Amino acid sequence: MLFRGLLQAPFVSFAAAFVAPVGRSTTSTRSSLSVPSTPCSIRTLSPAASSSLLSHNCRSSIADLLTLRAKMTAVDTAAASTGSSAEVSSFSADAKLASSTTYASAKDARDHVAQSVLAAIESGSSSSEIVIKSGELACQRDSYQTTLEDTVPISYALFEFVPTKAKGGKKTKKGKKKGQDNAAEAVDSSITSNVYNKQQIAIALSDSILYPEGGGQPCDAGKLFIESPSSAICIELDVVEVNSIDQICIQTCLVPKDITTQQVVDALEADGTTVRQSLDWDRRFDLMTQHSAQHLISAVALSEPFGMNTHSFSLSTKSDISYVDLLVDTDVDTDAHRDNLKRVEDIVNQNIRLNLPMQPRYLDQDDLQKAKDKGEIRSRLLPSGITGKIRLVEIGVGDAMVDQNTCGGTHVQALAQLQMIKFFKLDRIKSNLFRVYFAAGTRLLSIMEGAYQRQAALTAIMSCTEEEIVDRVTTALNEKREKDREIQRLNEKLCGFQAKEIAVELKSNDMIAAIDVGTADMSYKMALSSAVAERIEDMDGALLLLVGGSDDGDDGSFLLTGDAAMVDKTGQLVAQVLGGRGGGRGGKYQGKGTKIRSCLEEARKVLEEASTTRK
């Protein structure tokens, strides 16, 4: 096949910074924003260079494309000769699904794809390579671009899709189950069997509008539309995870049931195939809003007089609330830090109201180091071997500069797009660390809407105004606690009366009794059995069965107590008779059943037989 649309790109790790992007035409940009915006400043090439680049981008020379394909085929052939063809993949002309390796997990497939692309690149001179790497992907050149046309498949690998199970599996320190893929987590396991094929695919494309996970920002999601001259249909894949492995951007895709994996492979390997990418804009805007909010919080917290450096942060995808951990002075008390963080929140929102621009700027590495030495910018340690200009994300301009930070993530164009930032909890999780829980933009609106709806429901239930709700709820809870204490006192009296009657019944029936105690819960049954034992000097040979459940049903719980050896021997049989199961030891066996009342007499006979056998 022909490899179109590939660009030569020196690489800088996108997790911290990336090389200044080259100019490139885009096909669709999100522009319908409800707030003023300041466009990102993108360095462009000269007209002659741009013309050459666009020619290479959209109508790449066949010689270059065939050269790259030949390299990948050569790598695959070499690997096959050493018996390691499963380690390196290429789009060789004779590649067929039947001879392809299907990997056990998405992670293995992604590693395989990255190795295949890197091997192809490393097999030739660096000046002739035309693959766009993480650092200047389309998503990193323009955070508001929503579609990307005419990208070209570079390599792929198949893997076996295993739906996530609700329970079981050993968890790692980070809470994920061992061997569990994010791709599997992203899809509801209850629909996978009906919606997706068992075989799935990881793909490397010539460029990506979908942001790969990194730098603390979760990955984007979206769709791929594979269009091949050899196929009458456009194949649509769901992209559920995007990763950067050794600077190669890889999209993990799920194949719908209505097409076969063979159709996907045939389309990818056909000459002239192109791939259109579509972004899940709502997810992108949500994540870049929270990421931009974190930048602003970190910048203000670090400024004078606060001096709180950012230790780490989390942009949650499972909750509306994210957090940032700030390093604080251990000699300052907690209340003082809380007051300072409230001031940080005020300043953060002042900057949002000023609608300061948020845009990238590019520095040579020497200039970057000088700026770092002067304390003008925030920057984490950059990876070794980086060449080219470094990308900064700036908040503000001129004398109103709030922050300059190396970052490759997606961000808003102006702070007004954040709308507002709210701090929810301020927890001192360590002596030198404060965790600030926050939300911005649409997440904050969602939280506010939920809070209002709950408050409206509570005021209606309590028949009071919003201002009265706390006092009303407090009063209601206090009254409930007092009533619970009174019920406990009455239960203790009732328990005494019932225990006396049951003790009499036991003594008159060879120490065997089966009693329905109505709707009493297990704690009452336990208390009652203890009260009975106090009234009988010797429980040797005794078996007491207490059952209880709803007034109009046969479901409920049971408790068997008495002679420890006899309880242990008959407990399981009683549970079976009552249509349930249970467990216990030391003279107590409890459980639940579905026939606690209809089979109570049968259970009594089991107890009588056990007593007779013992004698």
Image (cartoon, helix red, strand yellow):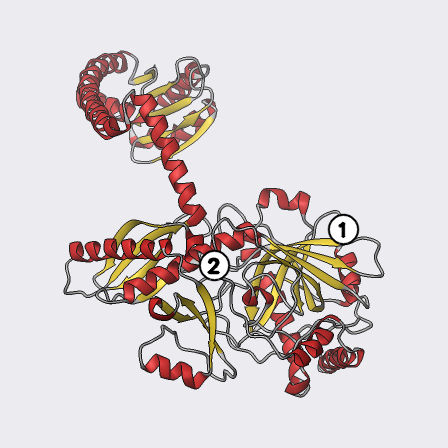
- Residue 210: horizontal and vertical position, in percent? 59, 61
* Residue 537 seen in render: no
Location of residue 469 (image quadrant):
top left
Return the residue nearer the eye: 615 or 63. Answer: 63
* Residue 16 seen in render: yes
Q: Quadrant of the N terminus?
A: bottom right
Q: Are marks 2 and 1 in contact (CB under 8 Å)?
A: no
Q: Looking at the picture, does residue 119 appear above or below residue 553?
A: below
Asked if residue 461 lies left or right of residue 599, the reply is: left
Return the residue nearer the eye: 272 or 252. Answer: 272
Asked if residue 495 lies left or right of residue 4, the reply is: left
Q: Quadrant of the C terminus?
A: top left
Instruction: Give the residue at x 57% y 45%.
Output: 188
Return the residue nearer the eye: 53 or 238. Answer: 53
- Residue 202: horizontal and vertical position, in percent? 65, 63
Location of residue 195 (image quadrant):
top right
Residue type, mark 1 in image? Ile
Return the residue nearer the eye: 166 or 244. Answer: 244
Mark 2 or mark 1, earlier in chain? 1
SS type, badge 2? loop
- Residue 300: horizontal and vertical position, in percent? 30, 63
Q: Looking at the picture, does residue 317 appear above or below residue 24?
A: above
SS type, badge 1? loop
Number of other residues with Cα within 10 Å of mark 2, as a class: few under 14, some 14 to 19, many 20 or more: many
Q: Nearer the viewer, mark 2 or mark 1?
A: 2
Residue assigned mark 1: 259
Residue assigned mark 2: 412
Mark pair 2, 1: CA separation: 38 Å
Q: Looking at the picture, does residue 614 appear above or below residue 140?
A: above
